[in-house]
Image (cartoon, rainbow, N blue to C red):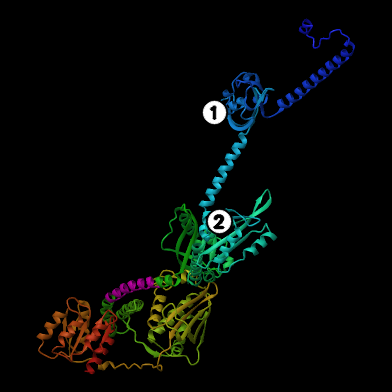
Amino acid sequence: AVQAMRAGGDYYLSKSSNFAIEVPLVIQEVLDKRRLRSMLVRIEDRYRRLIENMTDIVYELDEAGCFQYLSRAITELLGFLPDEMLGAHYGRLFHPEDLPGQGRQFHERRTGLRATRRLEVRLRNKLGEFRHFEVSAAGVYDRRRRFRATAGIARDCTARKQAERSLTQALSLLRATLESTSDGILALDHTGRVQIANGRFLRTWGIADALLASGDGLRMLDVIAAQVKHPFTPPELQHTAALDPEAETLAVWDLHDGRIIECSTQPQRVMSETVGRVWSFREVTAQKHAEATLKHSENLSRDLCETAPGIYCVLDTTGRITSINHRGAAQLGWTVEELCGQPFDLLVYPEDRPRMRAVFEQMCTTGLPPVGLEIRKCRKDGSLLWTSEEFTLACDAQGTVRSVRSMCRDISRHRQLEAQLLQAQKMEAIGQLAGGIAHDFNNLLTPILGYAQRLVQTLPEGSRQVREAGMILESASRAAQLTAQLLAFSRQQVAEPKVLDVNRHVAMMEGLLRRTIGEQVQLSVELAQDLGPVKADPSQLEQVILNLVLNARDAMPMGGKLTLRTSNVELSEERLTGVAGGRCVKLSIVDTGEGITSEIQSRMFEPFFTTKSVGKGTGLGLAIVDGIIKRSGGFIEVESVVGRGTAFHVYLPWAEGAPTEAKETVPSLETFGGTETILLVEDDETVRGFLADMLKGLGYTVLTAGNGAEAIEREAAYPGTIDMLISDIVMPKMSGWELVRVLRRHRPSLPVLFISGYPALPENEKMVLSEEVNLLRKPFAVDSLAQRVRQILNER
């Protein structure tokens, strides 16, 4: 039997009496064992396949802690083949820091203290890197409770640990963010329990620690409501949130302590499900006050810009108008709506656009606005407007220009007055030059006219010498007229203004004017009834009329119509020329000639400017007209259309009193002579000799002197009576005024006649003499001097 069992038998039956009964039973038992063994193999194979397909590592350790089984998952998770680790101690895989804990568990399993325990450990992969695993292990014991092995499962939890770490970091960041934000944050769940309440919220509303610990969000809302001037009701808000959990709200509250709080709420969602509500509280007291201050400042600035007399506009960096004040737009003839969005070039005079564009681009590039820029702008109707521009730049934090603000001031009147001032200064300078030339020229003309007149009177009538002397006299007279024009232009000619009737002088000149303009020009005279009186020099007024009529005739070489018209007008406003408004006489000279271009109109009153050919004009006519009219308190306007004609309008203010016309009386030539003694003082030797000869020829005794000092000596040395003093005014060493003062100390009643190439007497000298001064202007005719001398002597 022993040999049979050793040979591999499972059962041994002895032949006995029960052999027949036992054989079937043994056979059945053998068959059952085989079925059971086959079933166990199948079950083991099933579980092995299950284990091998698990993503977790299944392992078994022997009593010494060495691996005696490892599932294939170790290859996927740690990179080892199962066979590589069979027989290896578990400590080869564990992190050194985790070995003590694992060793304690292994010891506990060996001693039977604990059956199963879960640990989180770090296992090393084949590359030497550690991954996190969750390990569950249990001891394997035999029937006698003796430790035989350790069976365990290791689940990779690296991703979960990383997620937990990320979640921890996110929660930490969220908490730090909530605590560092300037907003107070309160999060309530749908029951009103507090989920989050940061420190700013607690400090803003003064939430007590006990209330915070209770987590009662509705009571916190009660605390908030008590501090608001117009409080909300927390239950009402809760009902609103319940009725509309997706509602988002925003409100600004005024608190009893003066603070202003901005409150916003929004739902808290988890996986698209609303689970609560988040409240955000921000103190905006300073911001609201700043906004109110800024709004007030903006309103003030807007009001200032709207009421400012200038043009205020804002441009973007492309040069387009983004805003402009209403007054400025109206000043340019536009509306605000028409100008917004338009390029600023639209408002700039075409000739100035390139310069303005260059200035604008330089401004935007350099960030430096120009100073004192004067530019011409163009109104909607095309008219010109001079402006002075001041710019300010709006820049961002980097210094880049974002917009340009322009303030324009209308300086058209200033430019016009400036041009008038320059013109006046130029006229004054030229006038002084003309006056000086006239003085010297008058000294030269005086003896020429005198001697020529004497020759005409003394030579045989009809002789060649008389004709030649007459030509000299005529040329000298024309030269004297030119000198008078120079003096009139320089405003140094002595005017003798009188209250006169313009209609009367126009009527008196009508015949002369018709002969002057010729038959090709039709003259029409339209005189107003009840024309007001004016105060002017009659001869100068006639000179104005004659000059304007001659210009009109020259403008109609092929003939035309010339109209002289007078009327009474009322000036309602002060003119640019400085003439006050009021009643005026308007004298119009209107022609149907060629017209005057705007370029010529801007220069026509300049001295020596003429459009006539050489020898046809001096360029002084209109300058003289302008000077005479201004000295009479009036002004002149011009209206002209090229090809249609020109109208000159002369305005003279009404004068007080009735018109008077002086009647001149001319003494007979027989009364011109005399036997009195005359002291003649003249620094020009030629003039002095001529005057002495002429006076002697009239029978007078003449004492001559070349200057004031010499005259004093002659007067002192003369034993007889000196009946009259004839003296030049401007002389070297001593003027005529000073000479008179010296001589009158012992001859207080000495009559004086001043002769001068200068046209007028300084006012301060008249005051010194305290009398009406007798003045005869050079050049003068012999008869004029003889008549004046005799008149003064007779009036002694």
Q: For residue 690, what is the image quadrant?
A: bottom left
Percent x, y of residue 659: 41, 93
Residue 75 highlighted magenta (yes or no): no
Q: What element carries label 1?
A: helix
Tag 1 residue: 100
Quadrant for the C terminus, please.
bottom left
Percent x, y of residue 257: 50, 67
Mark 1 vs 2, N-terminal side: 1
Percent x, y of residue 554: 47, 75
Above or below 733: residue 112: above
Residue type marked 1: Pro
- Magenta segment, principal secondary structure? helix
Tag 2 residue: 212
Q: Do the residues labelled 1 and 2 touch (CB within 8 Å)?
A: no
Quadrant for the N terminus, please.
top right
First to last magenta residue range: 420-440
Percent x, y of residue 427: 36, 73
Residue type marked 2: Leu
Mark 2 is surrounded, within 10 Å at the Cα level, by few (under 14), some (14 to 19) or many (20 or more) other residues, namely some
Q: Residue furthest right?
A: 20
- Is residue 349 in view from this perspective? no
